[in-house]
Image: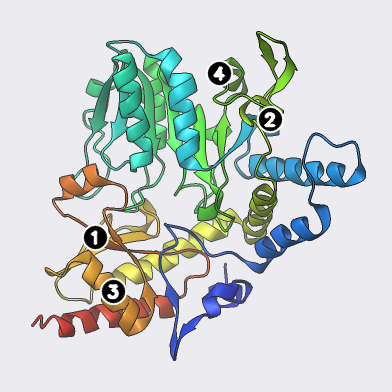
């Protein structure tokens, strides 16, 4: 099991204080804090190995290239990809989904086709598909949310027919914590010949993910939500599908030959990585994977189950608090959204910060369709990770009780 109290010593920012008040960081669904090993890996690259990759014929460039490609191998190993060549480095989940929308879906879809989504999707897994639908004439169809905050699969057979060419679903909701029914949707999609994309931004950081066992076609995720740096993420795809896709950007390093009037692309993954890549970020990404692998993803999930169960129990003690998401920790991740009476989420977040040093997210969480379905303008969200300890949850509850006092709630 993970000893979160000991792990916290690896994260320098968690030592920060506001005067006498310690920082209580409960916004890991937005971005995670970084351990010393990740910070040091990036610093060491710049201090000792800084050179461009895939280009130089000198030792320093070879070292940089080895470090960059080693990170790709680590990421591939984390998700059990068949080959590291199936891992494309992108700017993050959003960029990966847009790459698929622009260079795969556009050539797959035509008028009358359908794209299946769910109401719990992040805007990054909605807006690109809206643009695809506008360009191709395809139609978007959505699976609803049940009263207990799960994806409603009762209409799956009705909605997922031969018109559906793409099913794209979040592996874990960034608002409700709900774990997406990827297995069920994938099986139904396979039966009608549809392809499956998983937005793994919240899934991959929190539990073991095996893309071969999932049997999906594409998976996207971001380094900064799993202890790594911002500005880099990954698109995993089946090699044969990536081979068939056209690149989104043209330039250096994504070609095998350039003539005056036409060019030939480099093999995957390089045909999707034009120009100088985010080398230092990739090195940091690899170090973050190392840290998580050392912890063990099964233990990462076990810790999240424990801390989420503790949080749900403690939050149940707060009068007038409404929690949006499954009550069973086994059906969810550690992102817990809530409302307190009629206090606006932004006011609540400000009070938590000023009174207890508790950092939570407030707003629509880039999920406006879900907010409308829940009939709330915004929620506050506390989210947990490997360094979250019960004392963090206790501080949250104290802050919520204090908010009740400030607003005079009986």
User: Label 4 near label 2: C-beta < 8 Å?
Assistant: no
| Distance between mark 1 and mark 4 Cα atoms | 39 Å
The residue wearing badge 2 is: 85
Q: Residue furthest right?
A: 58
Circle 3 packing at 10 Å, graded few (<14), some (14-19), many (20+), is some
Q: Point out the frontmost of discs 2 and 4.
A: 4
Pointer 2 local density, CA inside 10 Å: few below 14, some 14–19, many at least 20: many
Q: Eyeballing the image, is 32 above or below 16? A: above
Q: Residue furthest left?
A: 410
N-terminal label among 2 and 4:
2
Question: Which of these two is toward me, 203 or 371?
Answer: 371
How far apart are the alpha carbons under marks 1 and 3?
Answer: 13 Å
**Where 172 falls versus 262 (above or below)?**
below
Whether tag 2 and tag 3 are in contact, CB under 8 A, the answer is no
Q: CA distance from mark 2 to mark 3?
A: 45 Å
Mark 1 or mark 3, which has the lower sequence index?
3
Q: Is residue 49 left or right of residue 133?
A: right
Question: Which residue bears the numbered disc 1?
Answer: 379
Tag 4: Cα neighbours inside 10 Å, few (<14), some, or many (≥20)? some
N-term mark: 2 or 3 = 2
Residue on which the image places disc 4:
245
- Residue at position x 77%, y 47% in the image: 67
Examine the image and state in which quarter residue 270 appears: top right
Provide residue 269's location: percent of width, then percent of height. 66, 28
Q: Residue 390 location in percent, x, y?
A: 42, 77
Task: List the residue tagged with mark 3.
Answer: 350
Neighbor class of circle 1 (other Cα within 10 Å; few <14, some 14-19, many 20+) is many
Q: Going 48% across and 83% down the picture, which residue do you hit?
A: 17
Residue at the limit of the structure toward the front, as seen here: 260
Quarter of the N terminus within the rendering: bottom right
Question: Under tag 1, what secondary structure?
Answer: strand
| Numbered disc 3: secondary structure | helix
């Amino acid at each position: 099991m993970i000893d979160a109290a000991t792990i916290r010593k690896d994260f320098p920012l968690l030592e920060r204080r506001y005067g006498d008040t310690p920082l209580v960081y409960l916004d890991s669904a937005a971005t995670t804090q970084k351990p010393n090993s990740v910070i040091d890996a990036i610093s060491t690259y710049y201090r000792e190995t800084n050179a461009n990759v895939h280009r130089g014929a000198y030792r320093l460039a070879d070292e940089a290239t080895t470090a960059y490609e080693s990170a790709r191998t680590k990421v591939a190993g984390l998700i059990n990809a068949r080959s590291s060549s199936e891992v494309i480095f992108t700017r993050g989940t959003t960029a990966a989904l847009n790459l698929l929308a622009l260079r795969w879906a556009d050539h797959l879809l035509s008028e009358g086709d359908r794209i299946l989504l769910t109401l719990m999707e992040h805007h990054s897994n909605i807006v690109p598909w809206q643009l695809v639908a506008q360009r191709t004439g395809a139609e978007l169809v959505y699976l609803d949310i049940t009263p207990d905050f799960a994806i409603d699969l009762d209409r799956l057979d009705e909605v997922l027919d031969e018109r559906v060419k793409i099913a794209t679903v979040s592996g874990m909701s960034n608002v409700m914590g709900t774990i997406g029914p990827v297995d069920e949707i994938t099986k139904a999609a396979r039966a009608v010949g549809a392809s499956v994309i998983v937005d793994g931004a919240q899934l991959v950081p929190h539990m073991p993910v095996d893309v071969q066992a999932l049997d999906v076609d594409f998976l996207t995720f971001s380094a900064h939500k799993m202890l790594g740096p911002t500005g880099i993420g990954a698109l995993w795809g089946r090699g044969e599908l990536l081979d068939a896709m056209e690149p989104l950007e043209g330039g250096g390093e994504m070609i095998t030959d350039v003539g005056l009037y036409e060019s030939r692309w480099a093999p995957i993954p390089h045909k999707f990585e034009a120009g100088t890549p985010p080398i230092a970020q990739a090195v940091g990404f690899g170090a973050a994977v190392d840290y998580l692998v050392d912890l063990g993803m099964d233990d990462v999930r076990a810790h999240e189950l424990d801390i989420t169960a503790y949080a749900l129990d403690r939050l149940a003690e707060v009068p007038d608090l409404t929690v949006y998401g499954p009550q069973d920790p086994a059906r969810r991740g550690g992102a817990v959204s809530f409302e307190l009476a009629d206090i606006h989420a932004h006011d609540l977040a400000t009070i938590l910060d000023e009174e207890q040093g508790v950092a939570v997210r407030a707003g629509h969480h880039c999920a406006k369709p879900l907010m409308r379905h829940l009939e709330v303008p915004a929620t506050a969200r506390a989210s947990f990770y490997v360094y979250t300890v019960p004392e963090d949850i206790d501080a949250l509850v104290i802050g919520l009780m204090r908010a009740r006092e400030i607003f005079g709630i009986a």
